[in-house]
C-alpha cells in the first residue's frame, strides 16, 4: 500500500499518541493550538477572552513539557528524586516535583532553559538553536497573570481587581468612549424610564491585550521549537 508521500518526519501526526517519543504531549499541544486558532478565527462570542487565552496558555505549557521530556529521553539525562521517564519531573528551585502537577510557566521555562543549555553542544548543527531574549520576559508576563493555570478557567480565581480583567465588557464613561477616533466604539447603554443614563459598557475593552499578544507569540515560538525537536531529535516520532 502506498504511503502517498508521507515522510518519517511527520510520523507523530499519523500514529497513536502513546507511541510517540514524548508519549503524546506534543501532539496534544498541537491539537490545543489548532483549537485556539479555530476559535480565534471563527468565534461568534461577544466575550471569548477566557477560553481563547486558556487554550493558548495550555498549548505553551504542553509544548514546554514535550521539549523538556524529549531532551531527557534523547540524551539519557536522569531525573532527580524518584522521577523517571515513566514519571517525569522537573526541578523547581531546590525541589523535584512531578511534571504532570507543574503548571507554572516560569518554573517550566527556567528548567527547560537550564536543560537546553546543558544539551546545547549535543544538538545538531543543522538548526539554529537560539532562544530569543524576550521569550523569558513573555513567559513571566503570562505566568505572573496566571501562575497556577486557573486564572483563565474561572470567573473568580484571584483578586477582585484582577478578575475584572477577564472580560472585554467593561464599565466606561460615555463621554470618553469616542475619544479615540481610530477605534470604533461598541457600547451598551442602560437607561431609566425617563431615558436618563444609568450605566454604559464598552463591549470590546482591551483588558488583557499584552497578555494575549504574548501568548500568541509564545505559542508560535514553541510550535517552531517543537517542530525542530521532532525533525532533528526524534526522527519524527
Image: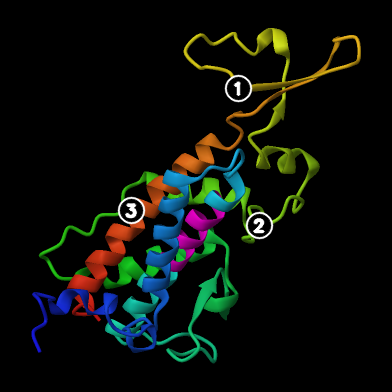
* Position of the C terminus by quadrant: bottom left
Instruction: Place residue 27 in its image quadrant.
Output: bottom left
The residue lying toward the viewer, choosing from 81 and 234, is 234
Q: Disc 1 marks which residue?
A: 186
Q: Disc 3 marks which residue?
A: 221
Q: Is residue 218 magenta?
A: no
| Residue at left offset 54%, top offset 88% | 81
Q: Nearer the viewer, mark 1 or mark 3?
A: 1
Instruction: Place residue 30 in its image quadrant.
Output: bottom left
Query: Sequence order check: which comes first, mark 3 or mark 2?
Result: 2
Q: Nearer the viewer, mark 3 or mark 2?
A: 2
Q: Nearer the viewer, mark 2 or mark 1?
A: 1
Residue 10, horizontal then vertical, whole percent: 21, 74
| Residue at left offset 41%, top offset 66% | 31
| Residue at left offset 53%, top offset 42% | 44
Q: Is residue 200 left or right of residue 235?
A: right
- Looking at the picture, does residue 194 appear above or below residue 51? above
Local crowd size for mark 2, using a 10 Å CA cut-off: few (<14), some (14–19), many (≥20) = some
Q: Is residue 122 visible?
A: no
Q: Disc 2 marks which residue?
A: 153
| Magenta region | 53-63
- Looking at the picture, does residue 73 appear above or below residue 199? below
- Looking at the picture, does residue 15 appear above or below residue 202? below
The residue lying toward the viewer, choosing from 217 and 122, is 217
Q: Is residue 139 left or right of residue 115?
A: right
Instruction: Place residue 224 in its image quadrant.
Output: bottom left
Q: Is residue 216 left or right of residue 94?
A: left
Local crowd size for mark 3, using a 10 Å CA cut-off: few (<14), some (14–19), many (≥20) = some
Amino acid at each position: 500500500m502506498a504511503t502517498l508521500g508521507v515522510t518519517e518526519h511527520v510520523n507523530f501526526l499519523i500514529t497513536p499518541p502513546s507511541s510517540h517519543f514524548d508519549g503524546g504531549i506534543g501532539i496534544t499541544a498541537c491539537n490545543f493550538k489548532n483549537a485556539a486558532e479555530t476559535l480565534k478565527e471563527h468565534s461568534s462570542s461577544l466575550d471569548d477572552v477566557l477560553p481563547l487565552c486558556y487554550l493558548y496558555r495550555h498549548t505553551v505549557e504542553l509544548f514546554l513539557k514535550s521539549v523538556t521530556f524529549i531532551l531527557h529521553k534523547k540524551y539519557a539525562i536522569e531525573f532527580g528524586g524518584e522521577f523517571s521517564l515513566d514519571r517525569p519531573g522537573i526541578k523547581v528551585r531546590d525541589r523535584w516535583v512531578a511534571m504532570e502537577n507543574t503548571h507554572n510557566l516560569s518554573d517550566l521555562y527556567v528548567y527547560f532553559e537550564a536543560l537546553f543549555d546543558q544539551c546545547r553542544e549535543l544538538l545538531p548543527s543543522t538548526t539554529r538553536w537560539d532562544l530569543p531574549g524576550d521569550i523569558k520576559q513573555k513567559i513571566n508576563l503570562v505566568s505572573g497573570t496566571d501562575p497556577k493555570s486557573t486564572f483563565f478557567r474561572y470567573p473568580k480565581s484571584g483578586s477582585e481587581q484582577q478578575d475584572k480583567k477577564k472580560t472585554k465588557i467593561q464599565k466606561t464613561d460615555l463621554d470618553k468612549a469616542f475619544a479615540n477616533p481610530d477605534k470604533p466604539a461598541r457600547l451598551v447603554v442602560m437607561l431609566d424610564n425617563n431615558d436618563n443614563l444609568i450605566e454604559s459598557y464598552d463591549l470590546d475593552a482591551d483588558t488583557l491585550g499584552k497578555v494575549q499578544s504574548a501568548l500568541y507569540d509564545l505559542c508560535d515560538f514553541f510550535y517552531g521549537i517543537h517542530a525542530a525537536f521532532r525533525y532533528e531529535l526524534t526522527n519524527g516520532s
